[in-house]
Amino acid sequence: GDLETWRLGECNIETSKLLIRKVYDFEMQMKAIFSNHALRQMEARNILIETILLVIQSPDSISKQDKTTSIYMKLIDELEKQYLYRVFVNVSKIPPIVITTYKTSKIDKYGYPLRQRT
């Protein structure tokens, strides 16, 4: 990863930002700021902030949408049904900014197999 390529004395501004970023993320345990749009979407879709923090802190997977945006995904059981939560996060900001989020029951559309309920 990025830290393996760092050598003492070769610390440029980008590397410094990266190191600060990794330490910050570790200390803050991926706390995030929520954009107004994200908060409106969460209210409209009945999504709790605690659920979004759970998705960000322990995702099943993370994919890159573009240079600054990552999509955190987690399968969550709710009321006898499984939902895939997708949280779009601007990871270039410190702390990261939740741009928008939604949940879907169309899990297979995103390459997730349906889990057997336990």
Image: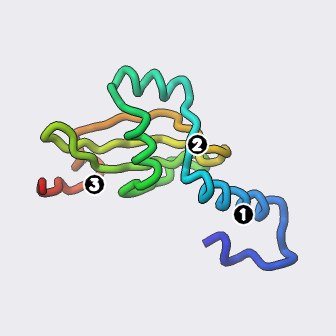
- Ranked by sequence position, the earlier of labels 1 and 3 is 1
Task: Name, please, the residue furthest toward the front.
Answer: 27
The N terminus, quarter of image: bottom right
The percent position of residue 62, horizontal first and vertical second, equals 44, 55
Q: Is residue 7 left or right of residue 45?
A: right
- Crowding around mark 1 (Cα neighbors within 10 Å: few <14, some 14 to 19, many 20+) is some
The C terminus, quarter of image: bottom left
Q: Is residue 102 left or right of residue 79?
A: right
Identify the residue at image location x=27%, y=46%. Answer: 76
**How far apart in space, not on screen, are marks 2 and 3 (Cα)?**
23 Å
**In terms of image quadrants, where is residue 101?**
top left
- Ranked by sequence position, the earlier of labels 1 and 2 is 1
Q: Which amino acid type is shown beneath numbered disc 1?
A: Leu
Provide the residue designation for mark 1: 19
Q: Please say if the residues under marks 2 and 3 sit with CB atoms less than 8 Å apart.
A: no
The percent position of residue 41, horizontal first and vertical second, equals 42, 25
